[in-house]
Amino acid sequence: MTEPRTQARRRAADLLRGTGPRRVVSHLLLLAVALLFIAPLLYALGTSLKPQDEVFTAPPTLIGSEVRWNNYVEAFQFAPFARYFFNSFLVAILGTAVVVAASSLSAYAFARLRFPGRDKLFVLFLGTLIVPQEVLIVPMYWLMQVLGWVDSYQALILPFAFTAFGTFLLRQFFLTVPAELVDSARVDGAGPFDIFFRVMLPLSRPALAVLAMFTFIAYWGSFLWPLIVIDNVNLRGTVPLGLTSFMSQQGTQWHLMMAAAVLAMLPSVLLVVLLQKNLVRGLLTTGFGGR
Amino acid sequence: MSIAIDTTAPAPGVSPAAPRGSRLRDDRRHALLFLGPSLIGLAVFTLFPTVMALVMSLFDWPVFGERTFRGLDNYARLLGNPVFRQVVLNTCLFVALYIPLNLVVSLGLAVWVSPRIKGRPFFRILFFIPVMTPVVANAVVWRFMYQPGGLLDSLSQSVLGSPAPSFLASSATAMLAIVVMSVWQGFGYNFLVFSTAIDQVPQEQLEAAAIDGANGRQRFWYVTLPMITPSIFFATTLTLITSFQVFAQPFLLTKGGPGNNTATLVLFVYNEGWRFLHMGLAAAAGWVLFVIIMGITAVQFLGQKRWVHYD
């Protein structure tokens, strides 16, 4: 009885997998697509290491007559990129700290504390997600003027640090922590803060890591808001702003600009590679990206 | 990981037998502390500005100088402004080109890079890289590629023997160039969404269909596709919302040009607010965008009953 059935299943599996030559062709074509897809980044990397007079050549070359690592040094001399990178790291790290702290605290309240109106308040929290950043920038800029925060680090960090994304993501995770753990800690006299710091946070490291990485990357690439709130780019400019002003001033120094662009991409690429396993989960629950 | 819990000395005042009422009161006090930072932050930086945007849109509100109440005047001026009408149309054109291209590329590749493809995790990461790298860095690279003498032009010269058109300077190609760059940058997100959804399709059903003689295309149309409609809904809705907000690509690649051919709604908000310093008008344009986005989202949610299968 079972013999023909397993045979049928095996045949079905073969059908699904595709056979021999077709399978090889499919893989080769896919590699070609992947190469085409990544070509702009390889071209940028190649150009960043070329001598200036070889930037525009026909036919195009990937690698110039010499590999000039010195372009990267020159890019830092051409524009204050050291300053931009320092600012970007500072803002992204502090911003991430604020986001993770505020959202884990509120997520705990929504997941584990009992208080009247909790679920209605949570819906209100989520409701704020529908307001696009572009609606907020005009009044936000006015608010920054009133507070005297134009051209300040806090203006780069705080205004978009309080979103319901993090709260939502962490609440979902906190809900999966077994109630018995919390209850037994409570029986032993632990207050909400003990439970939060000694039970919830240690158990939630994967979720916290996902939130932290996505937040860091969002701050790192942020463009519209810094463009608006930073006038003195040389002092408070972040990497994206630095690249923009570089582009308009040094329009002909393409090899240096590619070097700067490659450096700007590096932290994000490293994080994506580190993030791999958590990528799918983190992204689907935060709704990050999709631009 | 260590969960240090002292079991020897029960804290005074808190015993398992404590009446329910006192626990509730306790939580309420703590809830305020836990929620405090987020509540204050959201109130100051989201709720208040949302309302203020509406208020500002009713004023003639220069960055510096006298503010005067104008009622709905700003909205009337927007409707009568040919540039505004054009940026709305441009934004719709971008969305109309970007959404289908993004969905076809991401869904097509997700089906192609199926679980039976070797090195699947590698492709997932590869396609996701430009989603995570700064938009400005991506745009700088693409401006270099589109540049006369850049990669596309020099390829065209050496392969076809004639120079490529100046993609970003010609009104015929500028918007398309922006769309292509945006799809390259953005499809990796939907690719990942679809790819994980395809993983959830039960293998037995695909096998059963294969035994019944369904070919690859039929298996996709009648088994896989209906099962991933919730993901398609999620991806379409999110991509629609974000594509109406497109700003960095036109700002960095064309500055909205040539003419106003690639200027989008958010670029209009930026120009009115920070080049011409008309904050009231910029706020009104922002609210128009908000209303468009809410309308689109509502239509999506109303329409989903017809084609999304949750089961």
Image (spheres, rainbow, N blue to C red):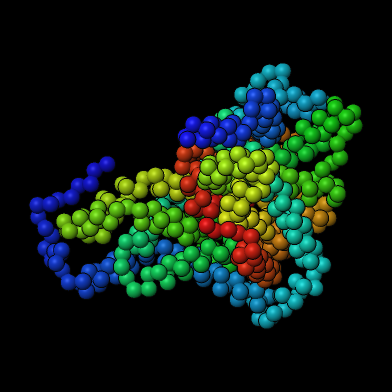
Up the image or down, B44 lies above or below B235; here it is below
Q: Looking at this rendering, what residue extends furthest in the top direction?
A: A65
Percent across and percent down for residue A36 are: 70, 32
Q: Residue at x 81, y 55 (%)?
A: B261
Up the image or down, B175 lies above or below A130; here it is above
Percent across and percent down for residue A250 are: 71, 39
Q: Looking at this rendering, what residue extends furthest in the left direction?
A: B8
Q: How many marks?
A: 0
Q: Looking at this rendering, what residue extends furthest in the right direction?
A: B162
Q: Nearer the viewer, residue B129 or A250?
A: B129
Up the image or down, B249 lies above or below B85; here it is above
Up the image or down, A80 lies above or below B71; here it is above
Q: Nearer the viewer, residue B116 or A72?
A: B116
Q: Residue at x 68, y 81 (%)?
A: B71
Quarter of the image with the N terminus of chain B in it: top left
Q: Residue at x 50, y 43 (%)?
A: A279
The answer to whether residue A46 is visible is no
Picture quadrant of residue A84 = top right
On the picture, is A213 further left or further right than B303?
left
Picture quadrant of residue B218 = top right
The answer to whether residue A34 is visible is yes
Percent across and percent down for residue A17 are: 60, 32
Q: Residue at x 53, y 53 (%)?
A: A287
Percent across and percent down for residue A239 are: 58, 43
Picture quadrant of residue A130 = bottom right
